[in-house]
Amino acid sequence: MSVVKRGTVYGTLLNFRGELDALGPKVNEPPYKAPPQAPVLYVKPANTWTENGGTIVIPAHAGEVEVGATVAMVMKSAHEIFGYVLMNDVQLPHESLFRPPVKFNCLDGFLGIGDRIRARNEAGDPAVFKLEVRVNGELKQTVRFSQLLRPADRLLADVSEFMTLGEGDMLMLGCDAGRPRVRAGDRVEIKMPALGTLTNTFVAEAA
Amino acid sequence: MKRARVIHQGVVHNATERDGQLLLEDGTRVWQDQVTWLPPLAPLERPRTILALGLNYADHAKELAFKAPEEPLVFLKGERALAGHRQSTRRPAGVQFMHYECELAVVIGQRAKKVKRDDAYDFVAGYSVANDYAIRDYLENWYRPNLRVKNRDGATPLGPWLVDREDIADPMALALKTTVNGQVTQQGNTKDMIFGIPWLIEYFSGFMTLNPGDLILTGTPDGVVDCQPGDVVVTEIEAVGALMNTIGS
């Protein structure tokens, strides 16, 4: 990670078909009333960052957390992508997507960040990225980025219509439905051959 | 003390207010219109966490036809949303409703984790004025208010000053006022916040660590109106400052 100074990390909601499918008719019901038009983004602030290999603390009041396996574009400039990196976008389980999820996904340590950034010529076409998520060695989820509603380049273009990303800023492509749930003691590995493995172990909050 | 960061003759300076002028660190005094103003915050090694409250004044919540919240409505923004005093903020072509929001900004002074509200002010460095513009045309009901509404480049002016905590006797009793082209359009008082500063610091630091330089924008009272290109918008908070911005196209 030392090549680029990390900037602001943005996540993207509802960029996988599976997420919208999981909502079903709720998408058109109150409070949402319509499917999203523009990209739906959120910020993962610096207090959430955990390095590859680091432990992530589950607060005492929460039994389980959800693992959000994804890939982020790491920006070189406003319109140039430096490379791609694995991310583990952790959140507390919650139903409503009406309000920003700050108290569910901005907890300390709730974003595992991979340590291998690879440019497109090494990482390959993001439209065919495929991640495998293992919990304690067992395969729990396969994430196929062919299922994105906005592929990487389109997402970046649509986001850039209303805000400018800068060097080191990261834009996560989205987390598919079926996020594995994990507890203290679980070890999570997110793997894609070209981007390596992002490993984080979950631990209980100290009393 | 009132602190600023400005560009004078191509160089970034830390400055303080002195008899209506700016005193630069090298001893030079300059007039306030002789500099380019930056947000009054020292640069950080890691990106600054910027928390912003919605519907945090009972009257504004009523105006927007929502019932007053039982817990704070909070969203985050990136640092590129910030702009300095006397800058211009762009109104996108074709939108119907772009409004200012005059807000007391709290700047965190030391690392805050699980802070109790009685101790909260110990973790505050000072205060500034934010104008948290919103473009209501872009509101959608997913993570509302979404970033397209609230995280636009340069659409959150901040300043002119960072006023030291010690200089503000009671930040929960300050008059707020916005003028558009000199006409008063918004008036309120920080005493009418639903969730006050000590409560907010306890709440946020209960689940996320706040770090020096992080910001909490505490929401805006009743009285937001549409602004058009060319309008001069001044958001002012008693004892903290008057932040000027011009709407650009």
Image (tube, coloured by chain):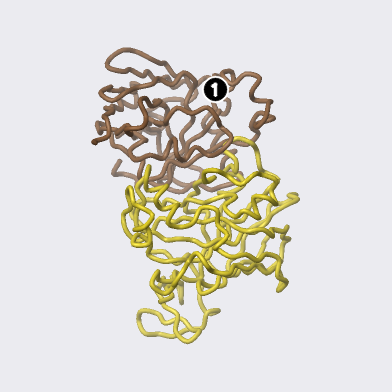
Chain colours: A brown, B yellow
Residue found 73% across the figure and 52% down from its top: B97
Residue found 38% across the figure and 72% down from its top: B166
| Camera-nearest residue between A181 and B123 | B123
| Camera-nearest residue between A132 and A182 | A182
Instruction: Name the quadrant containing residue B89.
Output: bottom right
Label 1 residue SS: helix
Residue lying farthest to the top in this orientation = A138
Q: Is residue A34 left or right of residue B244?
A: right
The quarter of the picture where the C terminus of chain B appears is bottom right
| Camera-nearest residue between B21 and A167 | B21
- Image x and y of residue B38, in percent: 48, 67
Q: Which residue is mark 1?
A: A19
- Three-letter code, disc 1: Glu
Tag count = 1
Position of residue B108 relative to residue B233, above or below, is: above
Inspect this view and state whether residue B170 appears: yes
Position of residue A139 relative to residue B248, above or below, is: above
